[in-house]
Image: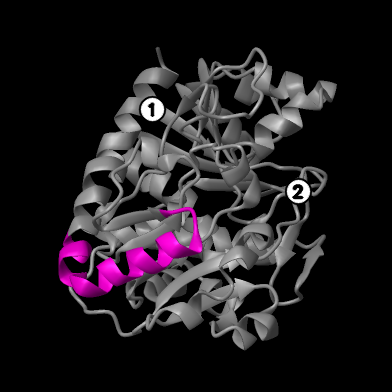
Amino acid sequence: MKILLAGIIARYPLGGVAWCSLMYLLGLRALGHEVFYIEDTGECVYDPAQNARTLDPSYGTDYIHRTLEPFGLGDRWAFVNYDGRYHGATAEQVKAFCGRADLFLNLSGGSWFWRDEYARIPRSAFIDSDPAFTQLAIAKGETWYVEFFRRFDRLFTFGANIGTPASTVPVGSFTWHPTWQPIVLDEWATDSAPSRDAFTTVMTWQIESFADIGGNKDVEFVRFIDLPARTPSRFELAINGPEALLRQHGWATVPAMRVSRTPWEYREFIQSSKGEFAVAKHRYVATRSGWFSDRTECYLAAGRPALVQDTGWTMHLPSGEGLLGFSTPDEAVDALGRLAADYDHHARCAVDIAREHFSADRVLPALLDEACA
């Protein structure tokens, strides 16, 4: 098939965001499909050099190219600026690909437009990476937003409980199909031992989007803020947030941008870690959405055990060896003790879980079958 993938690499030019789109592109190509990347949000991009939104998209467009070019995709992308100007491929080249395309995949709102060329692609699907937030925003009933989602043939979500009795998230008349972020395992596998004797994560204290809905990580993290005092395990947070406060409670911190500036620095930080310790956004937890982090999948694929807060994902994924869920500080302390007692076993189990549940050659065929049904 020929597949147009919309993503947000330039909108948020950060390592983890780039990998999300990149692994769809690489995974689909490995399955024999022809792929093309489009970004068409109508929004200004973030420029980390200025630490501000900017009308000049050059940082973002350069970031797209530097992300895709090493994989032979340097001529397989286009960015549509807020003013309608095309960068990378031309408007004519995009329309020509769309005219031959079989499927339009919109990842995380990589396009908020239904241009004629997108609408004419025979099949379309939206992939929701922010479960609960997306559905609650739809429930507000803003006409353009509701109609935008109605035009897709299929809707997918990283929230495994969305639309089931296990979650309180309202879905109305929409049907959401569960999926996971696909992982290209070869890009994350490493034979090197961790160089950091610390459990790490990369996180934002509060996000900008869905500000009217609320429920960010800060709400959950304060419940576990004294964890370093209760365990001999060490922690290092790459964070966009209150570093001084966290250091006072025993958390080592580095600015998130220091490890997220490029996809390769982001990957190195994860691969160098002993494992992951992470809380989830409060909205994911409170609604029992079943959300599971694409970042955590990368830790597992690198052979790094993960201890992450349960959002309801334990109903769908194994928990206890390699991947451990927790809901309370006591559960987190207990899990850290189990990891310390047999780290090598948990590291091997982490890879097995990544291979069994998140490998692109497992996730993507199921998604394509449903999208094209």
**Residue type for callout 1:** Leu
> Which SS type dominates the magenta stretch?
helix
Q: Write the residue at 56% across / 83% down.
A: 253
Residue 151 place in picture, x, y as percent? 65, 17
Q: Write the residue at 63% across / 24% down.
A: 117
Using residue 272 as the reference point, say whether residue 326 is left or right of it.
Answer: right
Q: Nearer the viewer, mark 1 or mark 2?
A: 2
Sequence order check, earlier mark of 1 and 2 = 2
- Asked which quadrant contains residue 308, the reply is bottom left
Name the residue nearer the viewer: 226 or 30: 226
Task: Give the Cα distance between marks 1 and 2.
Answer: 30 Å
Query: Which numbered disc covers residue 367?
Result: 1
Which residue is labeled 2 in the image?
A: 214
Name the residue nearer the viewer: 311 or 131: 311
On the question of residue 1 being in view, the answer is no
Using residue 38 as the reference point, say whether residue 313 is left or right of it.
Answer: left
Using residue 304 as the reference point, say whether residue 276 is left or right of it.
Answer: right
The range drawn in magenta is: 326-348
Residue 325 place in picture, x, y as percent? 39, 53
Q: From this view, report whether residue 29 is shown above or below residue 325.
A: above
Q: Is residue 269 magenta?
A: no
- Asked which quadrant contains residue 142, the reply is top right
Q: From this view, report whether residue 166 is shown above or below residue 24.
A: above
Tag 2 secondary structure: loop
Q: Write the residue at 67% across / 65% down.
A: 205
Residue at the far front in the pictured view: 330
